[in-house]
Image (spheres, rainbow, N blue to C red):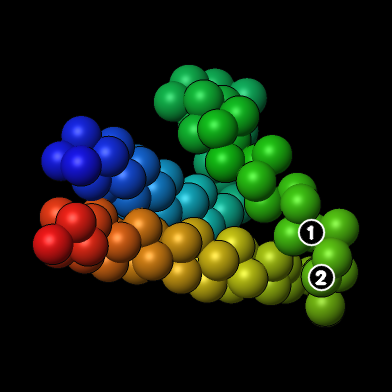
Amino acid sequence: MEAVALVVQSIGQFINIYLLLLFARVLLSWFPNVNWMNQPFAALSQVTDPYLNVFRSIIPSLGGIDFSPILGFFLLQFLSNALLNLAYKLPYMAL
């Protein structure tokens, strides 16, 4: 049971790291002089844009402002919290 908890906790931590990458992507999008074709920005864009494009197809930009990252953040934060809570409860479920 400890191995399952470790895997679930690792996935939750990975989601938290991905949230940080998304946050960096959103912050950098506020600067118009960032060239997304140069490294490291191109790598950041390749990692985060496929996930954000899912929400961009659901929520259109309004007035040139992209609100899709908000929904992306909420979903990832929910998943992270659910997985981390599950990881902490797993060892006690066997009792």
* Disc 1 target residue: 56
> Within the image, what quadrant is residue 47 found in?
top right
Q: Nearer the viewer, residue 61 or 6?
A: 6
- Relative placement, left or right, of 79 versus 30 is left
Q: How far apart are the alpha carbons under marks 1 and 2?
A: 5 Å
Above/below status of 46 relative to 12: above
The percent position of residue 16, horizontal first and vertical second, equals 33, 52
The 10 Å Cα crowd at callout 1, few under 14, some 14 to 19, many 20 or more, is: some
- Residue 88 visible from this viewpoint: no
Looking at the figure, which quarter contains the N terminus? top left
What is the crowding at mark 2: few (fewer than 14 residues within 10 Å), some, or many (at least 20)?
Answer: some
- The dot on residue 59 is 2
Of residue 21 and residue 17, the one placed in the foreground of this image is: 17
User: How far from the left and from the top, in percent, is residue 35?
Assistant: 58, 34
The relative height of residue 81 versus residue 35 in the rendered view (above or below) is below
Q: What residue is shown at x 36% (from left), y 58% (from top)?
A: 83
In terms of secondary structure, where does tag 1 sit?
helix
The x, y position of residue 68, in whole percent, is 69, 66
Quadrant location, the C terminus: bottom left
| Residue 33 in view in this figure | yes
Dots 1, 2 in contact, CB < 8 A: yes
Residue at 55 percent of width and 66 percent of height: 75
Q: How many marks?
A: 2
Q: Which mark is residue 70?
A: none
